[in-house]
Amino acid sequence: MNAAAAKALPETAAPAADGALVLAFDGVLTRFGTLCLSHDEARELARCHDVSHADADLPPALRHRADEVDDVRTLLLEFARGEPAPWLASAVAVACLGDNHLWQDLGLPSRAVLSQLLSTYFPALVARNHGDMKWKKFLYKELCDRAQVLCRAPSCAVCSDYAFCFGPEEGPALPPRD
């Protein structure tokens, strides 16, 4: 873990987030079968949190998107704070490949729980999400901004996709896949 990621968390943050972390790890493992961690990272995660071992690779149907996972994980790691942040960055990056809201693909009960996790472990990145953009959209917008890829509209306010990026994220929590 780099020096920025090793910054200490407030004492109250880790216990409050631990249950949601395990839910996120288990949710991604159930839906995708991997957290895209190295063998050593997966072993350390299993030691620190009660999380089962997973494959290091994406399922064959998603392997063509491995660069995407790496890009999202790298973005998150630049803002990481606290020991579980690198593992959470991997879980979030893999979950971004899902077709549902990010919180649903992480197996979390609500967007609020995801927002709390991200606020705890990636606070500087969360602070950049002006207007409360949906998390998956926000992460990909950050990647586009870095690559200097322009959105179709001159500003979010006049974009025809505004409702897809901002607004409520409603729906049920998804049941675990078999």
Image: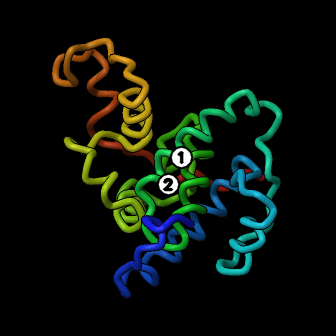
With respect to residue 74, does 19 lie above or below? below
Extreme residue toward the left, this view: 157
Tell me which residue sits at (79%, 52%) in the image: 56
Image quadrant holding the N terminus, namely: bottom right
Q: What residue occupies the far front of the structure in this picture?
A: 3
Describe the element under mark 1 as helix, strand or loop. helix
Residue 42 picture quarter = bottom right
Would you say 38 lies left or right of 98 here?
Answer: right
Q: How many marks?
A: 2
Q: Residue 140 at what x, y percent from top left?
A: 44, 33
The location of residue 162, given as percent across then percent down, is 26, 25
- Give the residue at mark 1: 74
Local packing at callout 1 (Cα closer than 10 Å; few below 14, some 14-19, many 20+) is some
Q: Position of residue 15 (x, y in %)?
A: 46, 84
- Check disc 2 and report the residue beneath it: 77
159 lies left or right of 125: left
Q: Please report the residue visible at 53 percent of the width from the left and 42 percent of the height from the top.
A: 72
**Mark 2 touches mark 1? (CB < 8 Å):** yes
Image position of 8 with respect to 139: above or below: below
Task: Residue type at mark 2: give it.
Answer: Leu
Up-down relation of residue 143 to residue 92 (above or below) = above
**Picture colour scheme:** rainbow
C-alpha span from label 2 to label 1: 5 Å
Q: Which of the two residues, 165 or 129, is positioned nearer the viewer here?
A: 129
Q: Residues within 10 Å of mark 2 (few under 14, many from 20)?
A: many
Looking at the image, which residue is at 51% across and 54% down?
Answer: 173
Q: Which residue shows up at 29% across the image and 40% down it?
A: 133
Q: Amino acid at mark 1?
A: Thr
- Secondary structure beneath dot 2 equals helix
Which of the two residues, 31 or 159, is positioned nearer the viewer here?
A: 159
Which residue appears farthest toward the bottom when viewing the image?
11
Q: Which of these two is toward me, 96 or 9?
A: 9
